[in-house]
Amino acid sequence: MPEINPHFAREWVEFINPENSQQIFRCDLTWLTSFWNCTFGNGCQGIDKELADHGCCSDGAYYYSKGDETRVTEAAKKLTPDMWNNYNVARKGGKFTISELGLDKDRKTKKVNKTCIFFNESKEYFGCALHHLALKENKHFIETKPDICWQLPLRRSWETREVGDTKYEVIVIGEYTREAWGEGGADMDWYCSSNTEAHNGAKPVYLSNKTELIAMMNESAYEVLANLCGARMQAMTHRKTKHLPLYVIHPASAK
């Protein structure tokens, strides 16, 4: 099926951060209750058709911050030669190097043979070496992989809202659409979040990506979000139609 245009009507919810009254979370319920599922190695066609089995790893990962790069570097140092095809490449010249400057001069993971330095071609540890490291150490991959890698296709962005004399920071949790990549998004040969082929998960996104959402929000905020998503899922189950109009009743009018 062709890729779906992401500019459809969506249902959003807003609530105050339970841990910070000056912050508002604005979350895309339509996306978070969808059944998107990472299909790497199981149907993913890749953002580069010439490297289809590389998924979204073919361009390297841009770091969100210095701390992000530091955490990934420390994780990479734990990789062994059998777990990482580019173990020696990262140590070429006697210096441990996993990063480079991208076209926009921002720091990112190096590309080796047209793909991320952490991508393995070997059968035993095929795919992301940092992902395999997390599995080996019995931890979640949010502790080993670059932020952008474990967040996708979740997207967190920030806005500012003024209400009278009060200024709020609005944290937006939604779908990382192709468009959100800017010009580079148009060059991707395939994109998963808008493709029906990738919406085959056993659980909705707010449950399958619970660990990631807690890291992007906080545990208290996630509990609020999960309750709202759960209520929406239950309501949708009992509705005969799964499309507009939506029935979002103002609390002041609810009887």
Image (cartoon, rainbow, N blue to C red):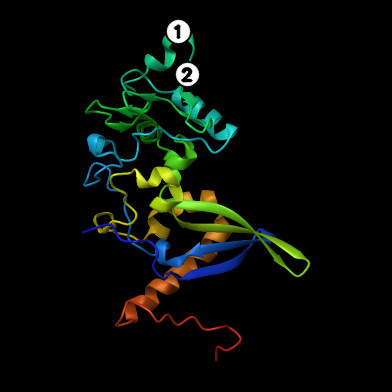
Question: Between residues 245 and 8, which one lies in front from this camera angle?
Answer: 8
| Residue at 24% in and 55% down | 197
Q: Quadrant of residue 7?
A: bottom left
For the C terminus, give its image quadrant: bottom right
- Whether residue 103 can be seen here: yes
Which residue is label 2 attached to? Answer: 97
Q: Is residue 50 above or below residue 81?
A: below
Disc 2 is placed on an element classified as loop
**CA distance for labels 2 and 1:** 9 Å
| Residue at 39% in and 46% down | 185
Q: Position of residue 158 (x, y in %)?
A: 59, 54
For the N terminus, give its image quadrant: bottom left
Q: Is residue 216 left or right of residue 127?
A: right
Q: Is residue 75 left or right of residue 166?
A: left
Q: Is residue 137 above or below residue 96?
A: below
Q: Is residue 33 above or below residue 254?
A: above
Q: Quadrant of residue 200?
A: bottom left
The numbered disc on residue 7 is: none
In the displayed orientation, state which residue is furthest to the bottom: 255
Q: Position of residue 206 (x, y in %)?
A: 42, 59
Which residue is label 1 attached to? Answer: 93
